[in-house]
Image (cartoon, rainbow, N blue to C red):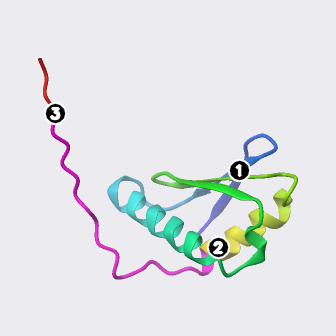
């Protein structure tokens, strides 16, 4: 898996993956995000991470630049993402939202 790191100012960066897009890509990014959040409590390298925002082929990481540095955090997350395997037990959920158009 190839990952491109795209800085977004001084407090965020996006990891752009060469993964499939669409529903399969979104499911994979959501699983990756869930796995990273689960590992967050076990590792001090996560200090300063404010938010993780998954998309179909990318993951945006927002962080506090006074609590961590970009190079160390991005390297740590890329390494974690590349070694993490997709959870086989994750099943997609279907949401139905009622709507009324007048």
Q: Tag on residue 13?
A: 1
Quarter of the image for the N terminus: give it.
Answer: bottom right
- At 15% across and 39% down in the image, what residue appears? 98
Q: Tag on residue 99?
A: 3
SS of the residue at dot 1?
A: strand
- How far from the left and from the top, in percent, is residue 64? 79, 52
Residue 10 placement: quadrant: top right
Q: Looking at the image, do the residues carrying marks 1 and 2 touch, with CB atoms under 8 Å apart?
A: no
Label 3 or label 1, whichever comes before in sequence order: 1
Q: Determine whether, in the image, residue 34 is placed left or right of residue 69.
A: left
Quarter of the image for the C terminus: give it.
Answer: top left
Classified by dominant secondary structure, the portion drawn in magenta counts as loop
Label 1 or label 2, whichever comes before in sequence order: 1
Q: Determine whether, in the image, residue 32 is placed left or right of residue 49.
A: left
Q: Nearer the viewer, residue 46 or 92?
A: 46
Q: Is residue 86 magenta?
A: yes
Q: Nearer the viewer, mark 1 or mark 2?
A: 2
Residue 18 placement: quadrant: bottom right
* 98 shown above or below 30: above
Q: Looking at the image, do the residues carrying marks 3 and 2 touch, with CB atoms under 8 Å apart?
A: no
- At 64% across and 73% down in the image, what residue appears? 40
- Which residue bears the numbered disc 2? 40
Spatial CA distance of label 3 from label 2 is 37 Å
Magenta segment, which residues?
82-98
* 35 shown above or below 26: below
Q: Residues within 10 Å of mark 2 (few under 14, many from 20)?
A: some
Spatial CA distance of label 1 from label 2 is 17 Å
Q: Is residue 66 magenta?
A: no
Spatial CA distance of label 3 from label 1 is 36 Å
């Amino acid at each position: 898996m190839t990952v491109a790191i795209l800085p977004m100012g001084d407090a965020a960066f996006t990891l752009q993956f060469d993964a499939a897009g669409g529903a399969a890509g979104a499911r994979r990014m959501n699983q990756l995000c869930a796995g990273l959040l689960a590992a967050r409590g076990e590792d001090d390298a996560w200090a300063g991470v404010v938010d993780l925002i998954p998309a179909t082929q990318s993951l945006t990481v927002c962080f506090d630049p006074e609590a961590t540095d970009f190079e160390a955090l991005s390297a740590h997350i890329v390494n974690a993402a590349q070694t993490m395997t997709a959870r086989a037990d994750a099943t997609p959920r279907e949401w139905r939202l009622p709507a009324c158009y007048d």
